Amino acid sequence: MKIPKYIEFRNRTNSVLSRFLKAAEPEEGCCILIGKTNSSTKDHKRNIWEVTHVWNCQNIWGEEESRLINQNIEAVSNQKNMQLSKKNCFEIDAKDQIASHKWARENDLEVLCCAHSHPLNENRPSEMDLLFHQPPGLMVISNKDGDLKAWWIKNKLKFHSVKIEVFSLT
């Protein structure tokens, strides 16, 4: 997977995303971003990812369906003296993942990445985000003010920001 030059939110999808994530507060909200790669230009060397749809998801962190809570996570939380909860962690429900992938395929689109909020912290990948993200790939994070930032996660230790553009016909 190649790093995008920038991620382009189309037709107010950035506003939709911000509202979905804000609605989950005080817990972390989570969504799946759907669209196309390289669709903003005929020059495919530019590698632009275009977000056309936002799939709102359920955060199941700590619930019975959760697959992520195990001894490794408990070790991280004990080491950092932090209580892990939906206020600082998220896990997208597998049903939402399956449904969004199916819908994207049926509509000739791609699942681009997941997005989530940090209602208590800055919109930068946390240690937990890096622990559970499958690199390489893109991650979009919103802070308590609804400001979005995109990050390319190269590996569990290296990441850098990706420019966000907003395109609207109105």
Image (tube, rainbow, N blue to C red):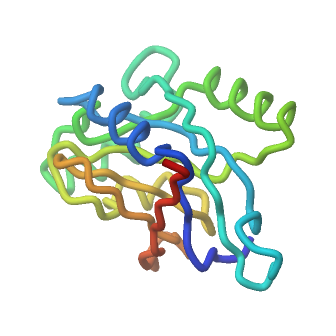
- Please state the horizontal and vertical placement of residue 17, each as a whole percent of the image: 42, 40
Q: Which quadrant holds residue 50? A: bottom right
Q: Residue at x 37, y 24 (%)?
A: 62
- Residue sitting nearer the eye, 35 or 124: 35
- Please state the horizontal and vertical placement of residue 158, each as a whole percent of the image: 46, 79
Q: Residue furthest front?
A: 170
Q: Residue at x 46, y 34 (%)?
A: 91
Residue 133's place in the image compared with 70, above or below, is below
- Residue sitting nearer the eye, 120 or 37: 37
161 to the left or right of 24: right
Q: Residue at x 52, y 18 (%)?
A: 65
- Please state the horizontal and vertical placement of residue 150, each as a whole percent of the image: 44, 64
Residue 12's place in the image compared with 1, above or below, is above
Quadrant showing the N terminus:
bottom right
- Residue sitting nearer the eye, 159 or 76: 159
Q: Which quadrant holds residue 130? A: bottom left
82 to the left or right of 62: left
Total labels drawn: 0
94 to the left or right of 119: right
Residue 2's place in the image compared with 18, above or below, is below
- Please state the horizontal and vertical placement of residue 5, each as a whole percent of the image: 60, 79
Q: Residue at x 48, y 48 (%)?
A: 170
